[in-house]
Structure formats: C-alpha cells, structure tokens
Image: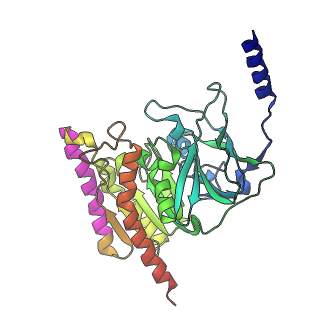
Amino acid sequence: MAAMLLTAAFTATADDKKEEPWNYVDAQELRVINKGWDNTLRPYTRIPANLKDSVRPDLWERSQCSSGIGVRFATDSKRIGVKYELLWNTHMIHMADTGLKGTDLYIFEGDSVWRHVNTNRPYTKSKEEKLVESTYVSNLDGAMHEYMIYLPLYDGVERLWVKVDSGAVITPGRPELIDRDTKIVTYGTSILQGGCASRTGMAATNILSRELNCEVVNIGISGEGKMDMCMARAMAQIPDADMYVLDPVPNCTEMMCDTLTYDFVRILRDARPDVPIVMVEGPIYPYARYDSYFGNYLPRKNAAFRRNYERLKAERPEGLYYVDAIELDGPEDDGTVDGIHLTDLGFRHYANKLRPILQQILSKNHLQNAKP
C-alpha cells in the first residue's frame, strides 16, 4: 500500500511539472537557403509558379517537394525544436519517413565543420493529420551557436517554425556560413532529389552544400528529369547561379539523350555564357552487372549524352565539363536500396565524386572574377 502511495505521489509531481514555454519563429523570418527562385507557389517549393501550365502534372507535383531547401539561423537557446505542416503526409515503401518527411538539425562546430545533431521522427496521429512537432535537443550550453535545418525530401512543407526558448536570441546567422554569394544549381532525377536517403541531410546536394560552403539548389524531379526545354529556360533565369550541374540521364531514354541534350545545354550556354556547366553521366546500376539488357543499354544512353557533350565542347570548349558515371557502390559495400536509389553510403560516394570537381571549378572562377 505504501509503495502504491509513493508511486502515485511521484506521478503527480511529474505531471505537475510543466514544460517551459516555447517561442515559435516563422522560418521566413530567418534565412531560407538552396532555393533557385523566389516566385514559387509556396515558400518551400522548388520551381516558379508560372511553370505550372507548361510542365507535366507529375513534374509539377514532384517539384512541390521541399528537397534540398534549408533554414539557417543562430541562437543561444538551450532547447531547439521544429513545427511544420506537411503538404501531403505521404509514405513510400522503400524510403524511411525520416528522410521522406522528417527534418535534420545541424550545428556548426569549431571553425570548419557542420555536425548532425538530431533528426525528428515525423509522427502524426493519422494520414489526414499533417502537423508535425518535435524537439531535437534539450540541455544545450546556452551559448550562441550556428544551426541549419534541412526540410523533407519527398513531401512538401506549407509552413515551418523553429522552436526556441521563450527568452532566447535567434537571428538568421552569419551569412558567410553556407555562403550566400555562391550558388550551384543542380538538375536531375530521383537520385538527385534524395531518394532514398535515411535522413534529409544525407541527400547529395545537402552534403555538397555543407562541404563546399555554398548554396546548392536541388531541382531533382523524381521520374521527370527529362530535359524539358522550359526547365532549361527557367534555370537560365536564376540570376545568381555560379554553376549548373546536369544529371538527367537516369530519366531519359537513349533517344532522348541523343536528341534533347544539345538543345537543353545550349539554352543555358547561350543565356549564361560565363556560367560553367557540368554534365554528369548516368550511373551503371549495380544490377546492370548481371542484367544483360541494362548492362548494354545504360552505357548506350551515356554514349549518346557524351556525343552531345563533345559536339558542344567542339563549338566552345570554355566552361563545359564532363563527369564519367558515378559508381554507387564499391566491391565491399552496397550503395543502393533497390538497385537504383541510394542509401546514405551511396550518397556519400556520389558527393565524393563530385566535390573535388566542383571545388576546382569554383576556385578557378573566383580567381578569374577577382582579376581587375
């Protein structure tokens, strides 16, 4: 009996302890990073609103995912959390919900590296419920730190708030971290979009953004990276693009690689002659080692893509680069979920292949721009 009374008393004491109040800060008051255009239908969608009637319905829908978009801020709060409203509250059988519709918190540690702090589990009470609220971390030291939140890869976000202590200071953060003056625009397929990272910070564009310290715009459109000319014209209008990275081959047929590549790249080159373009071959998926049809067909697609690169390079060699097929796995590891879409390890392989190439191009261009 005494034990029961003691248990009841302890429970009552715990229940009476109320959580300290939160301050909910609209992310629009902070710094939204990795967006190409301001004139989007919603704050966290990825292509201009005026393209809705010009693109296929599937392309439009998947462009409404918030993949690659992040929020930068600095705060001295001892607790940090997030609250956001999903667009669909979707689910896929081959991708973790934490990557699909969760969010990641990163902290800038020391003077050189972004570290993952935590990932929220995007729990909702039902499919119809779209509001997610979580706390990433409590009991921080109360000093001012720089942070970054990455948004969902395969769902959209209507609204998002950063949660901090009610008396905490919160600002948009130092602009030189994820340098606002350098922007890489990437275009491609579901692999680029982030399928199937276990969490949002592991999409290749987000890895590259952290490690190159610049904004990387993610225009990976799952199943729809088919070199639509209207997309090239829209990308050419991004005023502060410092580089274009094109990775459309996985969504294209051999004929599309043969007939669309030249005009798609030429639109960008003609409109933005001083902006370098990196053309990335499609990967040879692991299963293609054993499937005789795809083992033959995937290299043919790449060959058609490369022929157009060589034609463009012959016309004007400056500012055009080519990356051979990226290996998604090694002899002792497995970089894909389903033979195509990437695990976090696969995204690390992808980022490691591109990072030194992009770094060299950025360094070369910055040196040229610094000349009198």
Relative to 155, is 128 on the left or the right?
right
Prevalent SS, magenta region: helix
The colour scheme applied to this rendered structure is: rainbow
Does the magenta portion include 296? yes
At 76% from the left edge and 12% from the top edge, which residue is drawn?
A: 2
Picture quadrant where residue 340 is located: top left
Measured as percent of width and height from the top left, residue 51 is found at 58, 51
Residue closest to the far bottom: 372
Residue at left offset 35%, top offset 36%: 338
Q: What residue occupies the far front of the structure in this picture?
A: 2
Residue 350 in view in this figure: yes
Q: Does the magenta stretch include residue 218?
A: no
Provide residue 246's location: percent of width, then percent of height.
Answer: 41, 58
Question: Which quarter shows the N terminus?
Answer: top right
Task: State which region is magenta.
Answer: 292-312
Q: Is residue 363 left or right of residue 155?
A: left
Q: How many labels does the image show?
A: 0
Relative to 350, does residue 242 appear above or below in the rendering? below
Q: Nearer the viewer, residue 170 or 10?
A: 10
Residue 76: percent from the left, percent from the top?
Answer: 72, 56
Query: Foreground residue, 367 or 332?
Result: 332
Q: Is residue 64 visible?
A: no
Residue 133 position, x and y percent, is 68, 37
Residue in the picture at 32% in, 74% down: 315
